[in-house]
Amino acid sequence: MTAAIGAVREPQVYPSEKEQDTYVPENYHVPDGTTPNLETYMYYAKIQRDREALSAKNDAEGGRSGGLISRIFNRSQESDRRSVASDGKNVASSSEEGAGAQVTSGEYRAASGALRTATWGSVFYLITTDILGPYSTPWTFQQVGYGPGVACFFVFGILAAYGGFLLWWMFLKLDSERYPVRSFGDLGQRIYGRWFKYVCNILQSLQLVFNVGIIILQNGQGLSQMAKFKLCFSVCNVVWTLAGMILGQIRTLQKFGKVANLSIWLNITVLIMTMAFVANSPPNYTASPTGQYAGPVITQAINLQPFQDQLNGIMQIVFSYGGAMIFVEFMAEMRRPMDFWKAMAYSQIFIFVVYMFFGLFVYTYQGQYVINPANQGISAYGLQTAANAISLTAGLIAAAMYGNIGIKVIYNNVLVELFGFPRLTATWGKYYFAICVLVYWSIAFVIGSSIPLFSDLSSLVAAVCIFQFTYTFPPFMILGYCMQLDATKGDRQFNVNNPHAHRVDTWGDLSRWKRAFFTKNGFFHVWNFVLTLACLSCAILSAYSAVSSIVTSFDSSHSATSFSCHSPLDNSG
C-alpha cells in the first residue's frame, strides 16, 4: 500500500447505522434550552471519566483470565458485561447531578456503553497495521538524502506525537455519553464553533476523495506494468474505477471487516516481497525518470537539489505520520479512552522504526532509481507482477473503505443537513447512497487521470489536508481550549442547571481576554500560537511547491499527460 493509502487509516468496523441511530440521544441542549458551552461539556466529561475509572477499578478487583497478550489485545467478555451492568446501575444517580438531563434510561446507558468495546491494544493494532504502507519513504530519502531524511522523520514524529497527545487530552475533557465526540469536526466545534467543524469536514472530504483518486492512479500504474504497457493507461484507470463503484455499494463498514483484515496482511506481504526483490535484482530503469540509461546506484548523505523538490519529498513523511483525522473516531470506540496514549505512543515508535528501515533499505539498493510507490520499482517482470497483483487487491479494498467514509461525510453533513435528504437508514437514503457512490468514484477517476503524477499529487494532498489534521489543528485547538479554560477562573461557581449564569463578563470585554492569555500558562499559549503559525506557513509553502512541481512536470516533454494512453511508468522512449 502506498503512503497515500496509509495516510488515512482504515477505521474500525462500526455498528450499523440503525444501531447507532437507536442509541444516540437526540436532544443535546442544556436544561435552559440553549446550546451547551465549554463548561457544560467539561462537567459531563468529568462524570464520564469517573465512570470509566470506576469500571477499570472493578475490572482490576475482579481479575481477568488469560495470558498477558489476551489481557492487552482482547477484552474479556465477562469484563464487558460487568462494566455495562455497572453503567446501568450508576446512570440514575449521575442523571440527578445534571437535573433536566434527557439521558435517564439505564437501558440507554448500558447499550451505549456496549458500543465502546475497543482496548488500547486493539487500537494499537489498528493504527500500526492500517498505515503499514511506507512505500513512499524510499523516494523521500532519494529527494533529501540520508541525513535530512532521518532528521525529518524524527522531528515530524515528535510533532505528530505531540499533536496526538493534545487531541487525546481534549477528548478526555470534552467527551461524554450525553455529549459524545464522534469525529475531529465534533471536537473542533466544541472549541471554536460550527465554522471550524465545516472546515474540518471540507478538508476531510477533500483528503478522502483525493486518496481514492491516488489509489486509482497507483492501481492503474500497476495494471499497466502487468500488461507490459500494451493496454491504454486511461483504460487501466477505468477498470479500477468500475471495480470501486461495485465494491463501494457496500453501505456499512461492518461488512468490510473480513476484507479489511485481508488487506492488512496483503500489505505486509508486499512490504516483505519488495525488500527481498530489490536486494536481489537491479533497479527498474524503465520506470525511473532518471534511469533510461543504466548506471551505478548512487546514494547521498545530503541531496543538494532545489528546495521545492526537497519539500515534495518531505511531504511523503507527512503521509507517514498522518491519520490524526480519525484518532478521535478511535477514542470514541474505546471503553477507556484514557488508555489511548499507550496505543499512540507505541504505534508512533513502531511506525518510526518500520518506515525508516524500509526507506533506508530500498534507497540503499536503488539510490537515484527509486520510484514512488517503491513496490513498482522491481525490475524482474515475474516478481513485479506478483507484487502488483497483491498490492492492487489491497489498494482496491482500501479505496472502497475510504470512499465509503468520504461519501458518508458528504452525505450526512451536506445533503442531509443542508438539503434535507433522507438519512442512510431510510429506504430512499440507500438509493441516494448508491448514486453518490457512482458520482464519488467518477470524481476520483477524474482526479487520478487528469493529474497522473503520483508523487506530486500525494505531496499536494499531504500539504493541503493531512498536514492540518496532524500538525496545524491540534496546537490551534489546544490554544482555544486553554484560553477559554483560563478565562473561567474569574467566573462564579458553575451550575449545570443554569450553565450560562456563572460568567461575569463576555468575550466582548477586555477583562476576559486578559484572563485568557495573561496567566501562568502564557508561555504555553505563545508556544502553541507560534507552532500553529509555523505549521500553517510550512503547509502553504509545501502546497505551493507541489503545485509548481505539477505545472513543471506537465511542461516537460517526458511527463505523462492527462487522460493519456501512455503510462507514467513507461520511460523507455
Image (cartoon, rainbow, N blue to C red):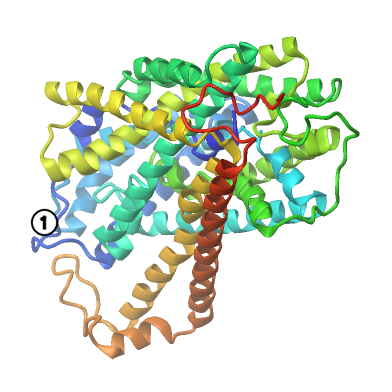
Please say if 395 is above or below 30. above
Please say if 554 is above or below 503. above
In the orientation shown, which residue stands out farthest toward the right? Answer: 296
Q: Position of residue 537 (x, y in %)?
A: 52, 66
Residue 149 as seen in the image, left or right of residue 187: right
Q: Position of residue 394 (x, y in %)?
A: 54, 20
Q: Residue at x 23, y 23 (%)?
A: 435
Split into 4 quadrants, where in the image is the N terminus? top right
Out of 343 and 97, give the one closest to the viewer: 343
Split into 4 quadrants, where in the image is the C terminus? top right
Out of 377 and 162, give the one closest to the viewer: 377
Q: Secondary structure at mark 1?
A: loop
Please say if 172 is above or below 113. below
Please say if 40 is above or below 457. below
- Badge 1: residue crowd in 10 Å (few <14, some 14–19, many ≥20): some
Q: Residue at x 60, y 11 (%)?
A: 230
Q: Position of residue 6 (x, y in %)?
A: 56, 35
Can residue 260 be spotted in the picture? Answer: no
Q: Quadrant of residue 392?
A: top right
Q: Quadrant of residue 381?
A: top right
What residue is pinned by disc 1? Answer: 100
Q: Residue at x 47, y 32 (%)?
A: 448
Counting every numbered tag in the picture gives 1
Q: Position of residue 89 (x, y in %)?
A: 26, 41
Can residue 163 be spotted in the picture? Answer: yes
Q: Quadrant of residue 32?
A: bottom left
Residue 217 as seen in the image, left or right of residue 418: right
Out of 432 and 50, give the one closest to the viewer: 432
Amino acid type at circle 1 is Gly
Out of 44 and 461, give the one closest to the viewer: 461
